[in-house]
């Protein structure tokens, strides 16, 4: 528990969240980045549902986080296409991943409403 002061100084913001992919982009002030990363490893559930949070990128720039997110999406897309999909399923999956890539590329330093 960081308390009100810790929460305020951390400036934690959810900049992007994809419910279909369970992928988010969180920003925080530099000095608390390592503490936040460590704290995330102890999260076992979110709103009563089991959860395992992973940090795929920790750095100082939004552009770097977006690049890392795009690489992760591309990797997931390649893995998904290795499955036996019908042409219709493949088309829907491609459209979904493409939409996520576009949304991720438009993320700015504002929190998700």
Image (tube, rainbow, N blue to C red):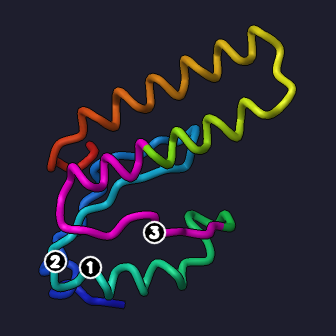
User: In percent of the image, x 25 and y 68: which residue is there?
Assistant: 59
Vertical order, 87 against 34 (above or below): above
User: Which residues are the magenta region?
Assistant: 51-70
Q: Residue furthest right?
A: 84
Q: Which residue is mark 1?
A: 33
Vertical order, 110 against 32 (above or below): above
User: Do labels 2 and 1 touch, CB within 8 Å?
Assistant: yes
Q: Which residue is mark 3?
A: 55
105 or 47: nearer the viewer: 105
Q: Which residue is mark 2?
A: 30
Q: Quadrant of the N terminus?
A: bottom left
Q: Quadrant of residue 93?
A: top right
User: In percent of the image, x 63 and y 67: which residue is there?
Assistant: 51
Left/right placement of residue 41 relative to residue 26 reads right
Q: Quadrant of the C terminus?
A: top left
Q: Quadrant of residue 85?
A: top right
Across and down, in percent, residue 21 comes to 57, 43
């Amino acid at each position: 528990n960081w308390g009100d002061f810790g929460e305020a100084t951390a400036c934690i913001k959810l900049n992007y969240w994809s419910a279909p992919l369970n992928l988010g982009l969180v920003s925080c002030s530099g000095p608390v980045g390592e503490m936040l990363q460590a704290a995330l490893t102890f999260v076992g559930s979110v709103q009563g549902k089991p959860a395992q949070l992973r940090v795929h990128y920790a750095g100082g720039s939004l552009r770097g986080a977006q690049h890392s997110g795009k690489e992760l999406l591309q990797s997931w897309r390649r893995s998904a296409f290795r499955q036996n999909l019908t042409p219709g399923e493949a088309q829907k999956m491609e459209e979904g991943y493409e939409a996520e890539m576009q949304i991720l590329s438009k993320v700015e330093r504002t929190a998700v409403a």
